Amino acid sequence: MSILFTNVTALPMAPARTVLRGVYVAVEGTRITHVGPTRPAGEFHRVMDCAGLVMLPGFVNAHTHLPMTLMRGYGGGCDLHTWLNDYIFPAEARLDDRAVAAGTALGLAEMIASGVTCVADMYDHCGAIIEQVLKAGLSANIARGVTLFTDDYSFGSFPGCVETQELTRRWNGFNGGQIRVDACIHGEYTSRPALWRDMGAWARDNGLGMHVHVSETRSEHRECLERWGKTPIQVLNGYGVWDCGRALAAHCVYTTAEDWAIMREKGISCVHNPWSNLKLGSGVAPIPAMAEAGVNVALGTDGMSSHNSADFFSDIKLAAVLHNGVEENPASLSAWDALEMATLNGARALGREDTGAIAPGKTADLILVDFSAPNLIPCHDEAESLVFSAHGCNVAMNMCRGRVIYEKGTFLTLDLEEIRAQVERYALPLVFGAKPSNP
């Protein structure tokens, strides 16, 4: 399939932070083949006039838990650890593959409609998640979240570790890299050193990235210091967790300058989850200081159970305004900084250097935003408007890997009515107590 976009206004996310106007963007197969002021030669299956629209690279949601859409708003008003132990963990214990698939599909639909083309997901029942990702057409880094609370453990037989090994062999690199597998430790406070050592070695030996919750709350960070005399970043570093060369450290709210030096050296990206951290009362990550220290900072929603919305524009906006307010400096984190976190930096964090920008040779992960909407009129600065004025409902088109999967409010790869039926008649009754029915 080849598509030519004409009369394009685009933010290509190039280092110069320029806006292109009146250009042509050509897509053939899964790749962008042309970006420029002259029309490329040849015939195209579809020609689309982009007057009134602005093109961006698709967004990268670098930390989420897709099936937790089923728990949207459940247990609100609690701190993280009360919320997890009293509400979330008991509900998750009742999940099965079918319920996970339903929650995943619902989460993906919401993300697609707000411009997300790639996710990094941490959960279990990963086969069911991958099936829905492939059906939807996105790209994903999939990590089987592993906890360990016992000393009766073997990497070769412990269920989470066995699933990680099976996922790696079956899915890593699937369909030209559409699916990638990352190794995973849920967090320092939910695991033991034996797992840290073995999972770090598995990631290193198999060329995987690593995905870990880090310093999300003050109590988590403090208790780690009391146990080990080191921060989570530092103690995990001592067991080789970060030696794989690329890692996602979700949250990083209480990380230190010493942590940032390790993160920069080891290729550990911070995934900032501002909405989730504020809703749970966890705090505010020191993002401007981390970026100044050379840490790559990406952006994530976390799960919908602690965020309630998968509208990625809300996270982009909050990331920008939050730090300007905390630092009492309107230039602390600019609109361009926030957009880079959502695109280029996210792609880098996931080891996907072939996306996150609009340039020939890049994967055709593209979105179009409707600038004729009332909330985007007038436009004096496209970056300012996208960050501070736009909403997910302004996304007019989502293209993943050269395939249009959402356009003008219509999902082209997902059956929203079937998803709703699976959620309402099966998944929610299963998780929250009533007998499920078979839609």
Image: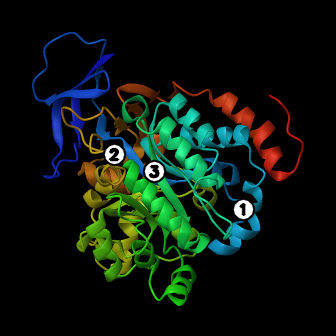
**Residue 182 got which mark?**
3
Categorize mark 3 by other alpha carbons within 10 Å: few (<14), some (14-19), many (20+).
Answer: many
Q: Is residue 49 above or below residue 366?
A: above
Asked which quadrant contains residue 307, the reply is bottom right
Question: Which residue matches tag 1?
Answer: 89
In the displayed structure image, the side of residue 302 where residue 371 appears, left or right: left
Residue sitting at x 29%, y 34%: 363
Which amino acid is tagged 3? Asp
Which amino acid is tagged 1? Phe
Q: Report, in whole angstroms, how far the alpha carbon at label 2 lies from the one at label 1.
A: 45 Å
Q: Is residue 82 above or below residue 6?
A: below
Nearer mark to the viewer, of 2 and 3: 3
Q: Earlier in the sequence, mark 2 or mark 1?
A: 1
Residue 226, horizontal then vertical, whole percent = 54, 90
Q: Which structural element holds mark 1?
A: helix
Nearer mark to the viewer, of 2 and 1: 1
Question: Which residue matches tag 2?
Answer: 377
The colour scheme is: rainbow
Asked which quadrant contains residue 180, the reply is top left
